[in-house]
Amino acid sequence: MTAQEKREAAVVEEYGVYGIAYDTPENGEEKMSKHTPGPWTFAGMHPYGWGIRVDDVWIGTAHNNHTGEDARPQGDFPSNKEGEANAHLIAAAPDLLAALKEATGALCQCCVRLNPQHKEAFEQGECGCTDMNGYRAAIAKAEIA
């Protein structure tokens, strides 16, 4: 097992992210997300950097170097172009998370069809396919709060 696979497996083990039904706990009730519900939108430049909003609420800022230049100056802030790109990525995060969850569930279903030995684990809400530990680790990282 590579170092990356060990880290991913550790996240999955620590946070119990084995299954495919990330939004539905055992009692069948839908789990409430801890992040601000979307859609998140890129809101352009404001005094502190590039903004991310939900409707009329500012939910985040991707900082930039505040110089108006695209080169990264000395210091702790990214260039304006990097800051803008970061804000777009942050604004897309809820959509990316939802797509990853859906894709992981679909891949688990395919895995079961190709690997019948995983059927029992799948029926218990788990997936025996370790190839997707990276996906599950990314989902766990996004949902930790």
Image (cartoon, grey):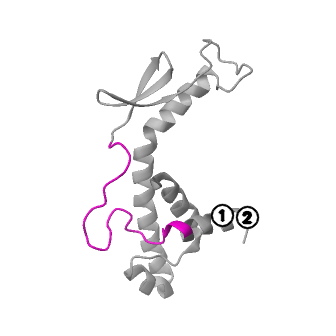
Q: Identify the residue at the far top of this view.
A: 68
Name the residue rendered at 42%, 59% in the picture: 101
x, y percentage for residue 100?
Answer: 45, 56
Amino acid at dot 1: Arg
State left or right for residue 99 relative to residue 76.
Answer: left
Name the residue rendered at 39%, 81% in the picture: 124
Tag 2 secondary structure: helix
Name the residue rendered at 47%, 55% in the picture: 144
- Mark 1 Cα within 10 Å, few/some/many (few <14, many 20+)? some
Q: Which mark, by number, is residue 101?
A: none
Please, is residue 72 above or below residue 114 in the view?
above
Q: CA distance from mark 1 to mark 2?
A: 6 Å
- Mark 2 Cα within 10 Å, few/some/many (few <14, many 20+)? few
Mark 1 touches mark 2? (CB < 8 Å) = yes
The part of the image, by quadrant, that contains residue 80 is top right
Which sits in the foreground, 41 or 47? 47
Asked whether residue 15 is drawn in magenta, I would say: yes
Instruction: Determine which residue is flagged by label 2.
Output: 3
Which sits in the foreground, 129 or 137? 137
x, y percentage for residue 141?
Answer: 52, 55
Tag 1 secondary structure: helix
What range of the chain is rendered magenta?
14-37
The part of the image, by quadrant, that contains residue 76 is top right
State left or right for residue 10 relative to residue 46.
Answer: right
Amino acid at dot 2: Ala
Asked whether residue 125 is drawn in magenta, I would say: no
Instruction: Determine which residue is flagged by label 1.
Output: 7
